[in-house]
Amino acid sequence: MVRRIGILFGMEDTFPWALIRAINERSEQEIEAEPVEVSYLRDKGSARYDLILDRISHEVPFYRTYLKCAVFQGTRVINNPFWWSADDKFFDNLVAESLGVAVPRTVLLPHKKHPPNTTSQSFRNLRFVDWEEVFQYLGFPIFLKPAYGGGWKDVYRCKDGAAFFDAYDQTHDLCMMAQEAIEFTEYYRCYVLGRSRLHIMRYDPNQPHHLRYVQNPPPMGPSLCLRIERDALALCRGLGYDMNMVEFAVRDEVPYAIDFMNCAPDADLHSVGKENFEWVVANMAEALIECLRKPESFEPMGEWPQHRAKRE
């Protein structure tokens, strides 16, 4: 019996089609990969796919519900739509610390403006923020960014209090984090697939978008390479993500995990470059085939409950 892998995607073109071809070339006709097809959902249905790779449900709520229903019907979904719906970047920092991964000092802030359908009475439990205490804890410059979100949207670098409040005023009803800025000497992005396959890419976030993946970078020091490998794998195992991109900023030879909730990471040929693209296509294809050949019971979340650190 042929098993099916479905790829759920949106506007991207290069990665999904290349991945489908790579799976079908490797599967020896026991597995077929294809784009997911979905219409309306019935409350009584059956799963069409044995496994789905999700590249778009974080932007389409209908797809997120579809994927949760698919899990209920026995489909394995990468990444887990239940955990992905519950996860946030501030919580991820707590997980990182429990795993021994260095992260910037961070605080979670109340919404600048009331979310829809709320009033001041909705926040009777909330107390005013002691901004001097926040600024003293973090130090300037400070990055202000959403606790839920990605793609460098609504991210501000604030050099002082005036710049911070000007940026905060623009965040409206978003839930924001304020984070210590890591003045880095090196920056890396790492693909982590199947919680075991890792590819480190030198990255320069200060360059124009099409030049950020550094071509022919200088070699990494062996100790830094080992630390980044250990931390990236530990984060994805702890959080339970089978496709992720982990970002590290290196300060004083210490890699700080800056962003590691990239569950549908950039994999476009024209963005990441030919070498990185070929790696992610080949290794994602092999990881998905392995997932089907070695089925596992449903996992509500990653391994983080086993690693909770006692916080003082």
Image (tube, helix red, strand yellow):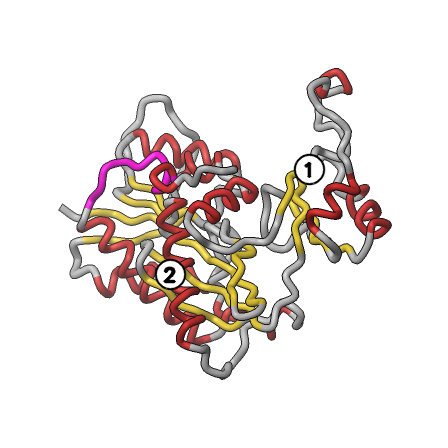
Q: Please name the amino acid that badge 1 sits on.
A: Leu
Give the residues in magenta: 295-304
Q: In this view, does 224 lie above or below 257?
A: below
Circles 2 and 1: CB atoms closer than 8 Å: no
Residue at the spot of label 1: 109
Q: Distance between the residues labelled 2 and 1?
A: 31 Å
Q: Is mark 1 on a helix, strand or loop?
A: loop
Q: Residue furthest left?
A: 1
Disc 2 crowd, CA 10 A, few/some/many (<14, 14-19, 20+): few
Q: Quadrant for residue 212, please give it.
A: bottom right
- Give the mark nearer the N terminus: 2 vs 1: 1
- Residue 284: x and y in percent read 33, 60
Question: Relative to 86, is 209 above or below?
Answer: below
Judged from the image, the secondary structure of the residue bearing numbered disc 2 is helix
Q: What residue type is labelled 2?
A: Arg
Residue found at x 65% / y 65%: 183
Q: Position of residue 196 (x, y in %)?
A: 31, 58
Splitting the image into 4 quarters, where does residue 244 fall?
bottom left
In the image, residue 28 sits, relative to residue 168, either above or below, namely below
Q: Name the residue under label 2.
A: 230
Using the rendered view, name the quadrant where residue 120 is placed: top right
Residue 48 belongs to magenta span: no
Mark 1 surroundings within 10 Å by alpha-carbon count, few (fewer than 14), some (14 through 19), many (20 or more): some
Look at 18% across and 51% down and name the residue there: 293
